[in-house]
Structures are given as structure tokens and as C-alpha cells.
Amino acid sequence: MTVQAQRHGGYLDRPSPSSLADVVEIILDKGIVIDAYIRVSLVGIELLTIDARIVIASVDTYLRFAEATNRLDLVEHGGGEPLPDFIHDLQEGGASGKVGGAVKGVKKALTSGDDDEDEDEEERPRRPRKSASSRRRSTSR
Amino acid sequence: MTETDLETDFETALFVYAVVSAEHELPKDLRGVDDAPLELVTHGSIGAVVGEISAVRPPGRRADLTAYSTVVDALLTGGAVAPMRFGTVVPDRETLVADLLAPSVDHLAQQLAELEGRTEYHLRVTFVEEAVLTEIAEADPRVRELRAATRDLPEDASVRDRIRLGELVTQSWERWARADADRILDELVPMVSTHRVRREPGLASVLDLALLVDADRAQEVEDHLEHLAAETSGRLRFRLAGPMAPYDFVGSG
């Protein structure tokens, strides 16, 4: 891709485009598709999508967030510190309260994961960190 | 003839990279998959950029994906580009014209006109996990209680509470992600030509968007995102890829 060199103050992350992970995320399953009946074939999709994983958010996700929450050192934050301005009133986002059971499936494709680590994924697809028992595999699409 | 005949009846085939204007000038020395030279096969006002590949080669190597992406993005210097889906292969030039270009020439020409002078970006906004978890814990007494109740217990003894804790945290997380996403979108949408949500706000990301931006507003969009990123640093991470070919804004031929 023709991503240009970083020219800003640096809060906005402008990733280096050459990483395979980025390329896959950008182009897989995109582009013009022509009707299937004509004599056209799509090569190469299988090998790439086999690397994709779909992880259904579940108890594992809850436990991961519980662990992450428990790792926080809240005491040092004083517990009553005012929240940053950017967080607006909870009312606005949370009034409905109808989120029960609505944890969405977390798609862990070949490219997903922490942004910081994308550069390392050139050759090896990321494996989900969850235990095998709760992982449901599927080729994406 | 069926699709499966393709693989046995032909030794070579044409890999189709993108549809462009018939006058599109291909970058010199640009090579594609298998290092093949590229060619523009035209029909009326449009053309397809193709390169020969072996029809009996093993499909879909990673290098092919990179080669495809390199070609499509390099084509951008010559004008509007409508990328074909990666892996599109036709047996020969006649088939390409008869089955791909001719039936869709008007539609594709119109699509190219819409893409002219526009470029795609991908924006991904994520929460800084520790910051947001801290906010959630501070905002919700139930989270603090469950945290206190589970923190120093062995995992086995507190599974039920830990699940409940995680459930509450993920619910808040998703709610906040949605609210932040809405706010950023409100600011961004008036600045862009079109946008497409690649992934709904949730645990994985606050925003995951493809943006189609007029080239003469690209700098404005980039500057605004830089401003937003600075304003929310420590809580949100902004990642912007592009400008790139409009992969997300071409439909079926």
C-alpha cells in the first residue's frame, strides 16, 4: 500500500503497510466479484482463510476481562478520581441496559490482536490465547 | 464448461487485478503475481489489468497476496482503480471481455467515475485496556465489590464471581465502545465521501471503518484524526492505514 511516512505529531498511528497481516485484513474478501456462473475461478482463498479463526466470546472472555480487572492497581488511582473529560455521561451510552448476553463474537482473524504486534506476524498466524475447549473454529465465510 | 474444467483444460490463465479506465497508463516495469508482466485488456471505456499465471500452480501463496496488493496500489498513480477480488482468474482474454468486461461495462464505468479523485483509508480505534478497565471499575460499585471478593481467592473458589465480574466489565466496555464510536463517527462522517463499518463497536475495537475520502480533503481528515488522537490519548488508540485503493467501495460487477 502507499501509506505515506508519518508527518504528524505522532498520536495517530500510521502503520507500515508492508506487513502481511495488514494486507490480509485490508484486501481479503474485498473487491469486485463477478457472477459465479461464468468461467471464472477464485484461486488462493482457501489457504488464507484457513488461517482465520473465529472465537466466540464466552466464559473465557469474561474470565479474561475479570483477570485484567483484577490486575489493576486501583488503590493508586484513589478510587474517586474524576474521570477524564472525554468519557461522557454514562447515561448516554448505558441508559438502555439491554446488553445482557449481547457479548458479540470476537473475530480473531489472522490479522487480529494487539496492534503493536502486527509486525511480527509475517509468517505465523496468531493463535487465539484461549483454551482449546472453548474455541470454535471455522473458516471465515 | 464448468469451473472445475478450468484447472485441467488450461495451462496458463489470466490473473485479474483491477478494472481501470481504458486510457489508464500502467506503471512501467510493474510486475504481478509470479513476476509476470502486466497488460491492459480494454473494452469500450474500461479495461482490466491482467497478468499471466500458470493454471496448474499451487494456489494462493502469501507472496501472491502481496504481489496483488502491490499492483493494485501502484495502479492508483494512473487514476481510479476498482480492485477485483483477490484470486480472480479467467482462462483467456476472450473470456475476460465476454464474461467480465462486456456485461458490466456501464456499471464498471460508473463505478470508476465515482471513485475518481477519491481514496480509501482504514481507521481502527481501540481502547487502551488498562485505562478503560480502571474507569469501569471506578464507575461501577458492583465491579469493585466483585473485584475485592475475587482478587485474593484461588481461581477455583471464585469462578462464579469472576465470571460475573467479567460479564459486568465486558458489558460496560461494549456500551462505552458504542458511545465513543458514535461520537467519533458524528465528527467524521461529514468530512468523508462514504464510510463503511467493517466491524461493529465491541470488545475488539471501538471503531473499525473504511473511509472513502475526496483526495482534496484527505489532509483535513488526517489532521482531524491526529487532533482526535491527541485529545484522547491514554484512553483511545487511533490507527490509520492509507491512502490505498478503494477495496471496500467496489461492489459486484
Image (cartoon, rainbow, N blue to C red):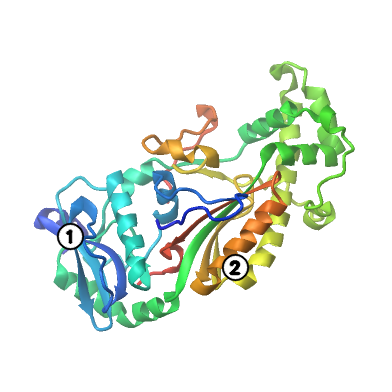
Report the residue marked by disc 1: B37
Disc 2 from disc 1: Cα separation: 37 Å
Residue B147 image position (x, y, % from top left): 79, 28
- Quadrant where the N terminus of chain A sits is bottom left
Q: Of helix, strand and loop, which one carries label 1?
A: loop
Residue A110 image position (x, y, % from top left): 44, 42
Vertically, is B98 above or below B16?
below
* Left or right relative to B84: residue A134: right
x 41%, y 58%: residue: A2
Q: Residue reaching furthest right?
A: A80
* Left or right relative to B251: residue A44: left
Pointer 2 local density, CA inside 10 Å: few below 14, some 14–19, many at least 20 = some
x 15%, y 72%: residue: B94
Which quadrant would residue A19 be assigned to in this image? top left
Q: Nearer the viewer, residue B163 or B190?
A: B190
Q: Of helix, strand and loop, which one carries label 2?
A: helix
Q: Nearer the viewer, residue B140 or B195?
A: B195
Residue B44 image position (x, y, % from top left): 24, 83
Report the residue marked by disc 2: B220
The amino acid on which the numbered mark 2 sits, given as a three-letter code, is Glu
Q: Nearer the viewer, residue B89 or B125?
A: B125
The amino acid on which the numbered mark 1 sits, given as a three-letter code, is Pro
Vertically, is B6 above or below B142?
below
